[in-house]
Amino acid sequence: MLTSAVQLASGTPPQLLPSRELMAFTLASHILLVPFGVALPFITLVMHYRGLRRGDPVALKLARRWSAVMAVQFAIGVVTGTVLSFEFGLLWPGMMGRWGDVFGLGFGVEAWAFFLEAVMIAVYLYGWRRLKPWTHFWLAVPLPLAALMGAFGIVAANSWMNTPQGFRLDQQGRPVDVDVRKAVFTPMFGPEYWHFVVAMFLTAGYVVAGVYAVGWLRGRRDRYHRLGFTVPFSIAAVLSPVQFFLGDSAARSVFHKQPVKFAAMEIVWKTGTHVPEYVFGRLNSDGSVSGGIRIPQLDSILAGFRPSTQVTGLTSVPAADRPTPTEATIVHFAFDIMATIGSVLVLLALWYAWVWWRHRGLPPGRWFYRCAAVAGAACLVTVECGWIATEVGRQPWIVYGNMRVSEAVTHTRAGGIWAVFGVVIVVYAAVFWSFLAVVLKMRTRWRVADETAAGLRAAPPPEVDTPYGPRGESDPAAVGAPVAAASDRHPGGDR
């Protein structure tokens, strides 16, 4: 914000600051929901498959409950995603008007994927009580693919903004001769897409597992909580070291394809070799670095595997074409936080794998579950940091090397944008509060149902316990002899 204020004082449009702040707020809010939209369908289907394959009513119960959360999250994502769609056109008409024909296909793909995902979620929820078990499962298999297609579209658009190609400029500076294939598959698309997708699966896995880790810490150590923890945590643990290498590869791609952004990420002021690595630290306007931990030559080694690797500095381009020292510091902190949390998650995954290999069971200590409970929140922080590093590191360009953010901004009065920003904050607070209220209400209802079933020492009727069975069964608390009869058929209920 300080940097934006300075830019405004230097003659940039007054609409720039509120437009940037509004876009930053809505993006930062929406991206917290993206991991669950992309990865929760897959995690739910893994649990669903386990339940069908092993005839496990606990796994089916978890899958059905997760599908309900998935639907609520998707509904909230519709609201926040729609707001973003309008903001692209209303806040940045210069970009959409000039470049929409080049990179707009990505937004089109994302919109179609969004529509398909909505239909498939509806079918999935409807099918729990009405379709044959395996038919229901196979109809839901395309759901994760639709989610991945949505990620494909939005990352294709973003990677094009970072490394634009697939066009040439005419004499008036307008893009012509658009090559859609090149515009979609830009140099940064592959590294950015896979890094993003795996991050979404990691985050969803650790967040879902963290819910059951908290339950374990509070003394709920039944099979329901063990299974609810094990499946999503195992998925995330397997992907943690994969993400470590994907992140390293993505950073090296930035080094080759976006050297100025890489200089901001590593706060490199002057181009040179034997460049040191700073763990945190703040870049000053004279190029010096305050604070942080300085590791000699490591930045060159990480970039090119040898100390003699030349790293491009921020001063390689004019000051107007690069992030300011404040922006570079923000990008550097975001990148270091993301890398630090990612490294810690790899250690947590190795801890889990070691105990499982030695004892074929979950770690017994409370500290492991404390760490697992925190891992989900930490992953959400890394998602925010990744977005900051990607977007702020591209400044002052909205289309790198072709259009500045100030050239794309709307001509709407700044006061009106600030007023809209205030309304959006209030609306988003209400939306997210409603989301949490609904999820907590469902959790309470499910807990009461489980406690009621445990008190009766019987499995509830199929309609309540497992997701498949005839409709119209009575609530287990209201039945008497029939529940006891069910207990005879299924000793021990779902425990």
Image (spheres, rainbow, N blue to C red):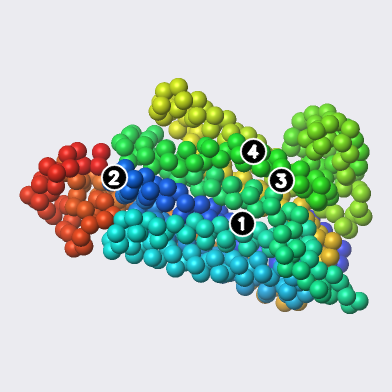
First in sequence: mark 2 vs mark 1: 1
The CA span between labels 2 and 1 is 41 Å
Q: Distance between the residues labelled 2 and 3?
A: 42 Å
Q: Quadrant of the N terminus?
A: bottom right
Residue that label 3 marks: 250
Q: Residue at x 49, y 56 (%)?
A: 144
Which amino acid type corresponds to the residue marked 3 in the rendered image? Answer: Ala
Which quarter of the rendering shows the C terminus? top left
Q: How crowded is mark 1: few (under 14 residues within 10 Å), some or many (20 or more)?
A: some
Identify residue type, mark 2.
Gly
Residue 483 position within the rendered picture, expressed as x and y whole percent measured from the top left: 12, 49
Q: Nearer the viewer, residue 27 or 250?
A: 250
Q: Position of residue 10 (x, y in %)?
A: 87, 63
Residue located beneath label 2 in the image: 55
Residue contact between numbered discs 3 and 4, judged by CB atoms under 8 Å: no
Which residue is at 58% across, 33% downward?
346
Kind of residue at disc 4: Phe
Looking at the rendered image, the disc whose residue lies closer to the viewer, 2 or 1, is 2
**Residue 244 disc label:** 4
Instruction: Pinpoint residue 492: horizontal percent, then vertical percent.
Output: 19, 38
Of helix, strand and loop, which one carries label 4?
Answer: helix
- Secondary element at image label 2: loop
